[in-house]
Image: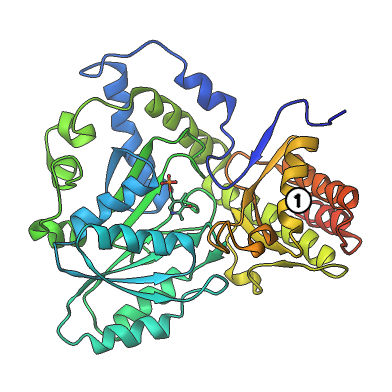
Amino acid sequence: MSLAQGRPYLAIPGPSTMPDRVLNAMHRAAPNIYEGALVEMTRGLYPDLRRVAGTAAHVAIYIANGHGAWEAANANLFSRGSKALVAATGRFGIGWAESAKRMGVEVEVIDFGRAAPADPARIAKVLAADTGHAIRAVLVTHVDTASSVRNDIPAIRAAIDAVGHPALLAVDCIASLGCDEFHMDAWGVDVMVAASQKGLMVPPGLGFVWFSDKALAASQGADLATPYWDWKPRAVGAEYYQFFCGTAPTHHLFGLRESLTMILEEEGLPHVWARHATLARAVWAAFEAWGRGGDIALNITDPAHRGHSVTAARIGGGGAGRLRKWLETEAGVTLGIGLGMALPEDPAYGDFLRVAHMGHVNAHMTLGVLASMEAGMRALGIPHGKGGLEAAAAVVAGA
Ligand SMILES: *Cc1c(COP(=O)(O)O)cnc(C)c1O
């Protein structure tokens, strides 16, 4: 007998749970892409995409995943041979750096490892040494989905300004938009990238790039921009090109309309952030209790440096890998692999997992995951401290 029958829950950090309302909004006949309801509705998406990012900047929607959004930002920020400084705090920071490098950008990476946030002072030091201002942009991940670290974006902005360097600040918010508090304009961010399938709760397929007037001006001479990825016509061009440079991602747009309404009009963005923060604290509380009686630890020690949409953790002796398998086959819950923490052939690979609490997730879903994890640890004989569920319930009760 397995207790996995019933509605499965994919608790990995993207694709996240999609609300039935979003899926239902997508279930329709092909719309006219030249005029009428779709075009009208699309016009209204842009102001809401600005609101969710906290900006008055331009926004381009691409038919792409997060890797595509990275390339879109790279293509407009850089020319062949121009320079990027990447502050990497996990697999996704490294991934953005690799993407830029493959496109012919000269990339300097400051690697802060897999369990610590970027240190603004080290970024400032590299920029201060760049007296010729060769570095065009600093690329940083807001929440690195692999390590679950959350970087202090205003502090990084302040560090760039303190040394008087003109580099643009570009931030990957793919795992954090609609989960963690973020204010593009107030925090001095020039370029921000996101994708549809995480906090925005829409199936994978839409990539977004927000870019300030300053970034638009700086992009005028960038020679990596190819026709599809070029953001200039998307900022100022005729609507058909401005929107999608071809056929619109019709059904995804209807799904996005529904999700933005849920986030902005119904729950309200500050409440969305607060819900994620509370569910994150519930997960951390359980792990902390489990860790008092076993080889179990959260990846990021300081809560101030943890993202609110995903939690990376270690369960030693291959416990994480065994637990993930048990949860999928016996409880109907799929947790994330320990991405970038160890290579698959490394015995330590089985020591890491990630619990997502991203997007369309509520208390019973997260508490259900934690209770299932505790059942799995019992079933598998994985030593763990007592009181994990009680601690998580206390967080939810106190919210
Ligand atoms: C998921 C993710 C990506 C990659 O997005 P894909 O849609 O898988 O290409 C990049 N950065 C961060 C922070 C992510 O969470």
Q: Which residue is mark 1?
A: 322
Identify whether 30 is placed above or below 117.
Answer: above
Which residue is depicted at the point 43% across and 32% down? 256
Q: Tell me, yes or no, if residue 57 can be seen here.
A: no
**Image position of 341 with respect to 266: above or below:** below
Closer to the camera, 380 or 59? 380
Q: Residue visible at 53% across and 61% down? A: 340
Q: Is residue 168 visible?
A: yes
**Horizontal and vertical percent for residue 75?**
20, 54
In the picture, measured across the screen, residue 167 lies left or right of residue 269, that is left
Q: Nearer the viewer, residue 200 or 188?
A: 200
Crowd rating for badge 1 (residues with CA inside 10 Å; few <14, some 14–19, many 20+)? some
Position in image of residue 366 (x %, y %): 73, 45
Circle 1 — which element? Answer: helix
**Occupied quadrant, residue 247:** top left
Q: Is residue 82 left or right of residue 197?
A: left
The amino acid sitting under disc 1 is Arg
For the C terminus, the quadrant is bottom right
Q: How many marks?
A: 1
Q: Choose between 265 and 296: the one closer to the eye.
A: 296
Q: Is mark 1 within 8 Å of ligand 1?
A: no
Which residue sits furthest left?
A: 221
Nearer to me, 22 or 264: 22
